[in-house]
C-alpha cells in the first residue's frame, strides 16, 4: 500500500519510482473490477448476457475484466505491500526498538483505516484490514532468503488450489467474487430446488438499454420447461437456459437493488455481515493463501531487485513475454470456460481450480514488467509520472474510489445502483481513474503527501 514512513524530505529522496508507478497502476486498475461490486448485484457481473444483453461490447467488457483485471490487480497490490514491508523491515537494526514500534503502529492504524473503510464507507471487500493483519506476521520472516520466500509462496499456491477444489468457492480480497464457482453454486441450487419456481419468482429480469433489470411478468412453474395456462393446465414452454437463470436470479437481484437504494443506516446494517465475514472467517479460508502468497512473493522480489526496477532490460522483456504469454493464455482458457457456463451451463473443467492462481499471478508479473519498462522509456515519462503520483497517494485514492462509488450508486446518494451495463461501468471506472491520475499529480504539486497519508502519519506518531 502507500509509501514508507520516512519523514517527507527523506521520503522524497528514497522513494522508488518503479514501486510508485506500480502502486498507482494497481490502485486505478482495481477499480475496473470493484466498480461492478459497487454498481450492480453480485451475480450480475458473472452473467453478462442476462444483465447487459448480447451486444458484443458488453461481452467484450466482461471478457476484458476477466482476462486482464480480475485477481491480477489484487495480486499486484499484494506484492507491493510485501515489498513495502521489506523497505521498512530492512531499516530495522537489532537495537532499534523505536523503528519496530513504528512499523507495528503503521500496521495497526492501517487496520483501523480498514475498519472505517468497511463499516462506515461501506466497502465490503476491504483489503486494508487484511494487509494490516497479515503484516503483523512478517517481522520474523524479514531475514528469510528470496528462495525460501518463493518456496513458501509456491506451497501456498498448491494449498490454495486444493482448498478451492475441495470447497468449490473463492472469496474476495479488495475485489468481487470469482465468477465461475459462484455460478456453479447457483446452478447447483437451481437443480436442488427443482428449477426457478422454488424461489417463487413472480418477475423475470431481462436487461434493458440502461443495463438494469427490465422486469416482465412471468411465472415459471417448478418445472422450468412448463408453464400453466389460464385454466391451470400445464403447457410446454421452450424456456431457454438463460430464461431459467433469469427466473432464478430475479428475486435476488431485486432484493439487492432494493437494499442498495435504501438510506445510509439501512445499508450499513445490510452490508455489515459481509464485511464481518471478510474480516473473520475468510481470513482463514482464503486470505492467508490468496493474499499471503503474493506478499511473500513481493518480499522475495524486493530482495531480488525485481520490484524496484534494478534488473536488466532484457530480464523485464523476458518477464513480460512469459508473464503475459502464460497468464493471458490461462486466463483466456478460464474465460472461455466461464462463457460456456454462462451461456449453456457447460460444467467448468476441474483444472480451473488449479489454474486460477497461475493465471492471475503470471499476468501480474506481466503488468510489473510492462510498467518497469515503461518507466525506462522517455516517451512514456509523463504517463509514468501520472501513475507515480497516484501511487504516492494510493491510500487516499483507494478510499476516494469507495466514497465516490457509494455516493454515485447507493440510495443515500444519486441512487444509480443497477442502472448500468458492463461497458458503461467500465467507462465510469475509466473516468474516475483518469480524474485521480490527473488530480494526484496536481495535488502533489502543492503538497508532499495525500490527505489520508498525512493523517496516517500523524496517527502513527500520536502518543509516542
Image: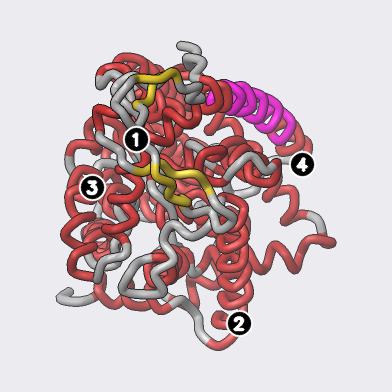
Residue that label 1 marks: 219
Q: Position of residue 449 (x, y in %)?
A: 47, 77
Q: Quadrant of the N terminus?
A: bottom left
The magenta segment: 320-338
Does residue 164 appear in this view? no
Chain-order first, disc 4 or disc 2 = 4
Q: Which residue is labeled 3 in the image?
A: 274
Distance CA(mark 2)–CA(mark 3): 36 Å
Element at label 4: helix
- Within-10-Å neighbours for mark 3: few <14, some 14–19, many 20+: some
Marks 3, 1: nearer the viewer:
1
CA separation in Å, label 1 and label 2: 56 Å
Label 2 neighbourhood size at 10 Å, few (<14), some (14-19), many (20+)?
Answer: few
Upstream in the sequence, badge 3 or badge 4? Answer: 3
Q: CA distance from mark 4 to mark 2?
A: 31 Å
Is 322 located above or below residue 261 in the figure?
A: above
Check if residue 347 falls in the magenta segment: no
Residue at figure coordinates x 30%, y 38% from the top left: 201
What's the distance in space between the residues labelled 3 and 1, CA to CA?
31 Å
Give me the residue at 64% from left, 48% from top. Answer: 309
Residue holding disc 4: 313
What's the distance in space between the residues labelled 3 and 4, CA to CA? 44 Å
User: Which numbered tag is attached to residue 442?
Assistant: 2
The first of marks 2 and 3 along the sequence is 3
Left or right, 3 with respect to 159, comes to right
Work out whether residue 383 or residue 105 is closer to the camera in this orientation and state it.
Answer: 383
Amino acid at each position: 500500500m502507500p509509501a514508507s514512513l520516512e519523514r517527507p524530505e527523506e521520503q522524497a529522496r528514497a522513494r522508488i519510482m518503479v514501486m510508485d508507478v506500480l502502486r498507482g497502476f494497481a490502485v486505478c486498475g482495481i477499480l475496473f473490477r470493484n466498480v461492478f461490486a459497487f454498481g450492480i448485484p453480485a451475480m450480475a457481473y458473472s452473467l453478462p448476457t442476462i444483465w447487459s444483453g448480447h451486444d458484443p461490447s458488453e461481452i467484450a467488457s466482461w471478457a476484458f475484466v476477466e482476462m486482464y483485471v480480475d485477481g491480477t490487480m489484487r495480486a499486484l497490490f499484494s506484492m507491493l505491500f510485501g515489498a513495502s514491508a521489506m523497505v521498512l523491515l530492512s531499516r530495522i537494526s537489532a537495537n532499534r526498538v523505536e523503528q519496530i514500534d513504528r512499523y507495528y503502529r503503521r500496521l495497526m492504524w492501517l487496520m483501523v483505516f480498514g475498519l472505517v473503510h468497511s463499516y462506515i464507507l461501506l466497502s465490503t471487500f476491504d483489503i486494508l484490514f487484511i494487509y494490516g493483519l497479515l503484516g503483523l506476521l512478517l517481522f520474523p520472516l524479514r531475514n528469510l532468503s528470496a528462495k525460501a520466500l518463493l518456496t513458501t509462496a509456491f506451497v501456498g499456491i498448491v494449498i490454495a488450489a486444493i482448498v478451492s477444489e475441495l470447497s468449490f468457492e473463492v472469496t474476495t480480497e479488495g475485489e468481487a467474487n470469482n465468477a465461475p464457482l459462484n455460478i456453479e453454486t447457483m446452478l447447483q441450487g437451481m437443480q436442488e430446488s427443482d428449477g426457478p419456481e422454488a424461489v417463487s419468482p413472480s418477475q423475470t429480469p431481462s436487461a434493458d438499454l440502461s443495463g438494469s433489470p427490465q422486469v416482465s411478468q412471468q411465472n415459471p412453474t417448478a418445472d422450468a420447461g412448463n408453464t400453466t395456462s389460464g385454466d391451470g393446465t400445464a403447457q410446454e414452454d421452450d424456456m431457454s437456459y438463460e430464461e431459467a437463470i433469469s427466473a432464478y436470479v430475479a428475486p435476488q437481484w431485486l432484493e439487492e437493488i432494493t437494499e442498495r437504494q435504501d438510506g445510509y443506516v439501512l445499508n450499513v446494517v445490510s452490508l455489515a455481515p459481509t464485511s464481518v465475514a471478510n474480516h473473520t472467517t475468510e481470513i482463514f479460508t482464503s486470505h492467508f493463501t490468496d493474499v499471503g502468497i503474493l506478499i511473500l512473493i513481493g518480499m522475495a522480489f524486493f530482495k531480488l531487485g525485481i520490484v524496484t526496477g534494478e534488473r536488466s532490460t532484457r530480464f523485464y522483456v523476458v518477464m513480460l513475454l512469459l508473464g503475459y504469454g502464460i497468464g493471458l493464455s490461462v486466463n483466456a482458457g478460464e474465460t472461455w470456460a466461464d462463457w460456456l457456463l454462462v451461456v449453456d451451463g457447460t460444467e467448468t473443467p476441474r483444472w480451473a481450480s488449479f489454474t486460477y492462481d497461475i493465471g492471475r499471478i503470471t499476468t501480474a508479473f506481466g503488468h510489473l514488467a510492462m510498467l518497469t519498462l515503461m518507466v525506462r522509456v522517455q516517451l512514456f515519462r509523463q504517463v509514468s509520472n501520472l501513475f507515480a503520483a497516484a501511487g504516492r497517494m494510493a491510500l487516499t485514492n483507494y478510499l476516494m474510489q469507495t466514497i465516490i462509488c457509494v455516493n454515485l450508486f447507493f440510495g443515500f446518494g444519486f441512487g444509480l445502483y443497477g442502472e448500468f451495463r458492463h461497458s458503461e461501468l467500465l467507462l465510469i471506472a475509466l473516468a474516475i481513474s483518469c480524474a485521480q491520475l490527473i488530480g494526484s499529480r496536481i495535488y502533489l504539486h502543492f503538497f508532499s503527501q495525500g490527505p489520508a497519508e498525512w493523517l496516517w502519519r500523524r496517527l502513527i506518531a500520536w502518543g509516542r
